[in-house]
Image (cartoon, helix red, strand yellow):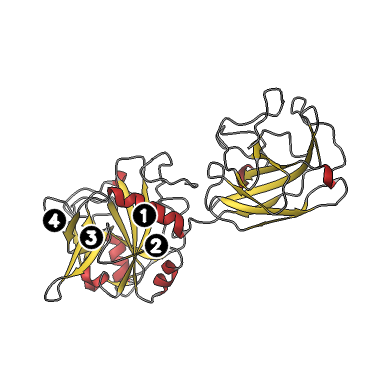
Amino acid sequence: MEVPRAGHSVSSPTSPCEDMMKNLSLEAIQLCDREGNKSQDSGIAEMEELPVPRNIKINNITCDSFKISWDMDSKAKERITHYFIDLNKKENKNSNKFKHKDVPTKLVAKAVPLPMTVRGHWFLSPRTEYTVAVQTAAKQTDGDYAVSEWSEIIEFCTADYSTVHLTQLLEKAEVIAGRMLKFSVFYRNQHKEYFDHVREVQNNMMMPSVKDNSGSHGSPISGKLEGIFFSCNTEFNTGKPPQDSPYGRYRVEVPAEVLFNPKTNLYFGDFYCMYTAYHYVILVLAPDGSPGDEFCKQRLPALDIADNKFLTCTEEEGGQLVFRHAQDVILEVIYTDPVDLSLGTVAEISGHQLMSLSTVNAKKDPSCKTCNISVGR
C-alpha cells in the first residue's frame, strides 16, 4: 500500500489498512464534501476535466468484500492515476466525517483495470446497507490531486457469513466446549399464556417462528430460519435441567429421542457471548428432508450426530439411544418442525425467572477474542 508522505496534505486514518483491496493499493483519507466543493486544506487541486464514473455496478458481494466497476469517457482517461471511493453505512450517507477513527470510509485506490475488489473487515460489516460513490483523480507533482465530479450514489447490502466463516466460528467454539454430559430431555420455558395459546388456538402444536437477531450480526439464520427454541443443558451435580430460567416459569420437557434421532440432521448455527463469561452455541435440529433441513444444507456446516463437540446421539447395545451435551457452553437448540405439546409434559419450575440471562435479540460482544473471527461482527 502506498502511504502518503509527511509532506502531503492528504490525511489518513489511524487504523491499519493492509489488504484493504485485493490486487491494488489503497490510501485511506478524509475527503472534502461529496458535492465537489474543495476544502481549504484538503490537498485537492482545482477541478480539471477528468471523466466522471457512471453506471456503477456492484457484484460478487460477500460479508466483507465486493467488486466495483463503472463506465467513463475516454477523454483524459490516460491522466487518471487514482480512484476516490466514498463508502458509508446507509444511515450515515450524508456524512463525510470520521465518526470512528478506526472505521475509514474514504478510500484512495491506485488506478487499475476494472472491476476491482474492495475488501476490509474493519470497515465492512455483514448484512449491512452501504452507499458508495466514486471520483477519478490525477495526482500532481506537488502531491495535490485534480478530481472529477462525484458519480451518482449507489446502494448495496453486504452478505451473511458463508459456510467458510461459520466453520471458523465452529472451530473456535470446539476449543471451549468442554466434556460431554448425559441428558434425557429437551426443554422450553415460556409463560403460562403461551402454553394456553398452544392448546386453545394452535390445536396443541408448538409452531416454528422466525429466529430473532441475537448472536453474530452475520449469522445467516437470524431473521430467516423458522424454528422452535429448546434448551438441553443440565446441572452437572444433578444431571437434570436447572430450575431457573429467563424465559418463563412454565416448562415443557420433551424426551430427547423425539427431537433428536438418526432421522434428524444437526447443524452448527452460531457462537457468541453477551459481554459476559458465558458463551452460547446455536445448533439446528432439522428432520431429514424437511424445509428447515433444505435451508440449512445450503448455509450451515453439518455436524455428525454421533461425533461432534456439542450435542451427540449415539446408539448403545440393545438399540438404546444415549444423548450428551457440552458442559462448558450454553446450547441454544432450534428445532425446525412443529412439535405436539402432548409429546412432552408441562409443569411450573420451582426456581426464579432470571431475566438478565435472556438472549432475546442479544448483541454479540465484538471485542471478545474467544468468539469473534476476522470478518465483520
Which quadrant of the rendered structure holds the N terminus? Answer: top right
Q: Position of residue 209 (x, y in %)?
A: 40, 64
Tell me the CA gap for discs 1 and 4: 26 Å
Q: CA distance from mark 2 to mark 1?
A: 8 Å
Local SS, label 2: loop
**Vertical relation: 184 (above or below) 64:** below
The quadrant in which residue 182 appears is bottom left
Q: Which is more foreground, mark 1 or mark 3?
A: 1
Q: Earlier in the sequence, mark 3 or mark 4?
A: 4
Q: Which amino acid is tagged 1?
A: Leu
> Label 3: few (<14), some or many (≥20) within 10 Å?
many
Label 2 close to label 3 by CB (< 8 Å): no
Q: What residue sits 49% from the left and 47% below the top?
A: 375
> Are discs 2 and 1 less than 8 Å apart at CB?
yes
Q: Which residue is mark 4?
A: 239
Above or below, 135 relative to 167: above
Check disc 3 and report the residue beneath it: 251
Under circle 1, the secondary element is helix
Horizontal arrangement in the rendering, residue 54 relative to residue 371 (left or right): right
In the picture, the disc for residue 71 is none
Whether the residues at callouts 1 and 3 have beta carbons within 8 Å, the answer is no
Image depth: mark 2 or mark 4 in front = 2
Q: Do the numbered discs 2 and 4 sit on residues whose CB atoms are within 8 Å? A: no
Name the residue at 61% across, 58% down.
60
Q: Is residue 136 left or right of residue 116?
A: right
Is residue 374 rendered to the left or right of residue 107? left
Q: CA distance from mark 2 to mark 4?
A: 29 Å
Look at label 2 and name its amino acid. Answer: Pro
SS assignment at label 3: strand
